Image: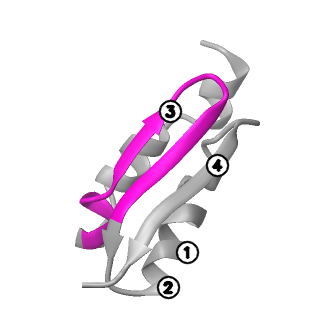
């Protein structure tokens, strides 16, 4: 087990897919060794920001891109 696995036991994908908020569970997360990208559509700017802050703890020094679109 690496230090990052100890500090961040859940991946960004797991964090959103395990959320109690249905809109967050529907978002797509792609990641590699340099970046984490969140994409999809939500109903409010608040939910968009919530998605970003929910995964921020697990980006582990990578760039985080929030490509979530607000609108219905």
**Residue displayed at 71% across by 36% down:** 62
The earlier-in-sequence mark between 4 and 2 is: 2
Q: Which residue is mark 3?
A: 31
Tell me the distance, in whole angstroms, between the alpha carbons under discs 1 and 3: 18 Å
Observer-nearest of 29 and 18: 29
Observer-nearest of 64 and 58: 64
**Residue displayed at 62% across by 35% down:** 35
Q: Quadrant of the N terminus?
A: top right
Q: Are marks 1 and 2 in contact (CB under 8 Å)?
A: yes
**Residue displayed at 47% across by 74% down:** 48
Q: Position of residue 20 (x, y in %)?
A: 29, 69
Tell me the distance, in whole angstroms, between the alpha carbons under discs 4 and 2: 17 Å
**Of the numbered discs in the image, which one, if any, rests on residue 46?**
2
Q: Quadrant of the C terminus?
A: bottom left
Q: Position of residue 17 (x, y in %)?
A: 30, 51
Tell me the distance, in whole angstroms, between the alpha carbons under discs 3 and 4: 9 Å
Displayed quadrant of residue 22: bottom left
Local secondary structure at mark 2:
helix
**Of the numbered discs in the image, which one, if any, rests on residue 64?**
4
Q: Residue furthest top?
A: 1
Q: Is residue 38 magenta?
A: yes
The magenta region covers 23-40
Q: Are marks 4 and 2 in contact (CB under 8 Å)?
A: no
The earlier-in-sequence mark between 3 and 4 is: 3
Local secondary structure at mark 3:
strand
The earlier-in-sequence mark between 1 and 3 is: 3
**Residue displayed at 70% across by 42% down:** 63
The earlier-in-sequence mark between 2 and 3 is: 3
Q: Which residue is mark 1?
A: 49
Q: Residues within 10 Å of mark 2 (few under 14, many from 20)?
A: few
Local secondary structure at mark 4:
strand
């Amino acid at each position: 087990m690496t230090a990052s696995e100890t500090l961040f036991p859940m991946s960004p994908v797991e964090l959103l897919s395990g959320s109690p908020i249905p809109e967050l569970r529907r978002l797509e997360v792609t990641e590699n060794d340099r970046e984490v990208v969140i994409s999809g559509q939500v109903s409010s700017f608040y939910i968009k920001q919530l998605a970003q802050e929910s995964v921020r703890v697990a980006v582990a020094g990578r760039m985080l891109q929030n490509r979530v679109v607000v609108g219905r």
